[in-house]
Image (spheres, grey):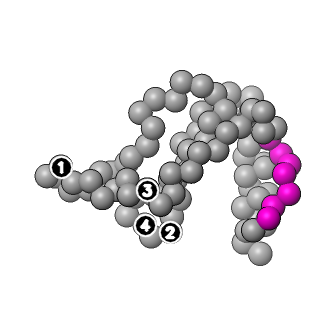
Amino acid sequence: MNVPRSGVSRAHLRAISWLGMSLYDADFGWGSPAFMGPALMYYSGFVYVMNAPGKDGAVAFALSLEPESMPEFRKTFAEKLALLAL
């Protein structure tokens, strides 16, 4: 889907997709991991998109944003999500 660029400035937001990575296939003897994600997020402005554990097709997000950026991100995310639901 080609969604026009808008919302949070791309200079302040970097999305990294880990979709399709087999994050939950690891088993060290006590079953699948409950959560897999970045260990540390040193810089603000990063969004990691990952498969959610135990749910086919579900997506999880790990965000590192400044508090003042969250309202704008929430608004833009909700708008883009609504476009996908059409």
* x and y, in percent, of residue 80 in the image: 76, 59
Secondary element type, mark 2? loop
Residue named by callout 1: 28
Taking 36 as reference, is 61 left or right? Answer: right
Q: Which tag, 2 or 1, sits closer to the chain's start?
A: 1
Question: What's the distance in space between the residues labelled 2 and 1, CA to CA?
Answer: 24 Å
Taking 32 as reference, is 39 left or right? Answer: right
Residue ID at (21%, 54%): 27
Question: What's the distance in space between the residues labelled 2 and 3, CA to CA?
Answer: 13 Å
Residue named by callout 2: 57
Q: Which tag, 1 or 4, sits closer to the chain's start?
A: 1
Count neighbours of disc 4 (C-alpha within 10 A) and say few if under 14, some if 14 to 19, many if 20 or more: few
Viewer-side label of 1, 3: 3
Contact? badges 4 and 2 (CB < 8 Å): yes
The residue under label 2 is which amino acid type? Answer: Gly
Question: What's the distance in space between the residues labelled 3 and 4, CA to CA?
Answer: 14 Å
Magenta residue span:
2-8
Residue named by callout 3: 21
- Looking at the picture, tell me which residue is in the foreground, 52 or 20: 20
Image: 14 above or below 51 = above
Quadrant in which residue 85 is drawn: bottom right
Residue named by callout 4: 55
Count neighbours of disc 3 (C-alpha within 10 A) and say few if under 14, some if 14 to 19, many if 20 or more: few
Viewer-side label of 2, 3: 3
The residue under label 4 is which amino acid type? Answer: Lys
